[in-house]
Image: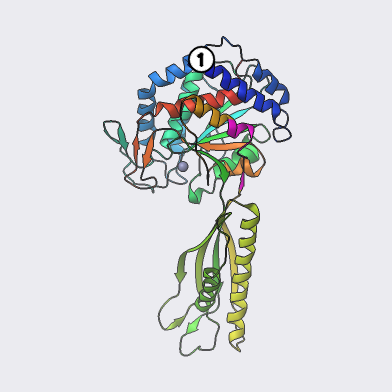
Amino acid sequence: MSAFARVIRMFLVVAIGLLGSTGEVTGTERSSQEAIQVPADQPAVQRALEYLRDTEPETLENQVAICEIAAPPFHEAERAEEYQRRLAELGLEKVRIDAVGNAIGERPGVGDGPTVVLSAHLDTVFPPGTDVTVTREGEVLSGPGIGDDCRGLTVVLAVARAMQEVELETEGTVIFVGTVGEEGVGDLRGVKHLFGDELEGRVDYFISIDGTGLGVTHRAVGSHRYEVTYKGPGGHSYGAFGMPNPIHALGRAIGKIADFQVPRQPRVTFSVGLVEGGTSVNSIAYETTMTVDMRSESVEELGEIDSQFREAVQAALDEENSRWESDVQLEVEIVSIGVRPAGQTPADSTMVQAAVEAAGFLGVEARLGGGSTDSNIPISMGIPAITIGGGGRGRGGHSLHESFDAIDSHLGTQRAFLLTSALAGVR
Ligand SMILES: [Zn+2]
């Protein structure tokens, strides 16, 4: 089969998939049928793929330039402004930075096909002051964030550039986004704002390009994170002996958590990550705190371990309070410091199948997996969403020695383009 015939076959398969989907994607049936009507002689897709292969050096240059603008958690503004400038330069419409700092540009569809968001995250895990200079040795780029997610950011721009270059007519609108707050402490605040406000009710498909490789993350690993604080008046360890001790209560809680029994399938994890408190060796502390992280791909299991955790924290308090015949009673405070909902876009769904098909056309295999990414939010709302790699090969993510090997990296750009166009529908 010629490459061109395979492009057409891919669009047909995707279109048939769209047609066949029931219930999951509402309101797109009409446009789905239109997606079938991709003219067999449509050369724009072919031209775009060639363009992306030929301009991969430019894509890599952009990757470096974006990455050399620091974007620590909660300090993405400078990179967001540059991203906004680049979106505008490509001739996109309604280019803006929204209320939480996401950079957004739209490419209107020519019909009323599905609206597709193609997104990558602006933030890094690195604190302010980190040296973000990128070095290059042959095909390998090195610098903090170069793969996660400067690769995603440059691929999003490349897809927009290719669509503009070949004047691709898509039925649905494609919205290009750089989100804030994807990493840990950011708690997905950028994507939460997109779906809760900025683009509320508009999005039919969400694609996040996060990191490297060609994997497809369709299962959302959810997490619940808490800060737990036991409090009391505190006192002298000898003079006030007989008073409940917040650190002892915390110890009881940790002992219970450490004994949690969890299934291996679906995977459930838990960890006390940080413990602090106390004043001195001869004092009963007045306050002590721990942070706890629990994760699972299963909504039910995540709910189950969450309630076990709450029971353990309360039981530890009760046990410490009743251990002593004291007028003093400790209190406990549980504060949520992060919620990432779990869920999945099914492996046999139209969207995942389209991603697999797009990779297959390029002669590569798309491995399906799970992870915790911007897609968690739309997935938890029942909106089809996946996170894909931006191509190339990454090493040392979240470390200062992160590197990106650009070998065959154009495949990542091409796959993102194929998937985005297929979902939006090509006229
Ligand atoms: Zn990332």
- Residue at horizontal 68 percent and vertical 21 percent from the top: 112
Quick check: 282 left or right of 310? Answer: left
Find numbered disc 1 in the image and state the secondary structure of the residue it sits on.
helix
- Residue at horizontal 40 percent and vertical 81 percent from the top: 281
Total labels: the figure holds 1
The one nearer the camera, 310 or 416, is 416
How far across and down, in percent of the image, does residue 401 sit?
31, 45
305, above or below 427, in the image = below
Residue with the mark numbered 1? 4
59, above or below 368, in the image = above
Is there any visible trace of residue 274 in the rendered image? yes
How far across and down, in percent of the image, does residue 423 sit?
60, 26
Quarter residue 213 falls in = top left
Quick check: 57 left or right of 234? Answer: left
Q: What's the colour scheme?
A: rainbow
Is there any visible trace of residue 107 in the rendered image? no
Quarter residue 16 falls in = top right
Within 10 Å of disc 1 (Cα), the crowding (few <14, some 14-19, many 20+) is some
The one nearer the camera, 266 or 182, is 266
Whether residue 340 is in magenta: the answer is: no
How far across and down, in percent of the image, does residue 236 sit?
46, 85
Quick check: 230 left or right of 408? Answer: right
Magenta extent: 343-353
- Residue at horizontal 51 percent and vertical 15 percent from the top: 4
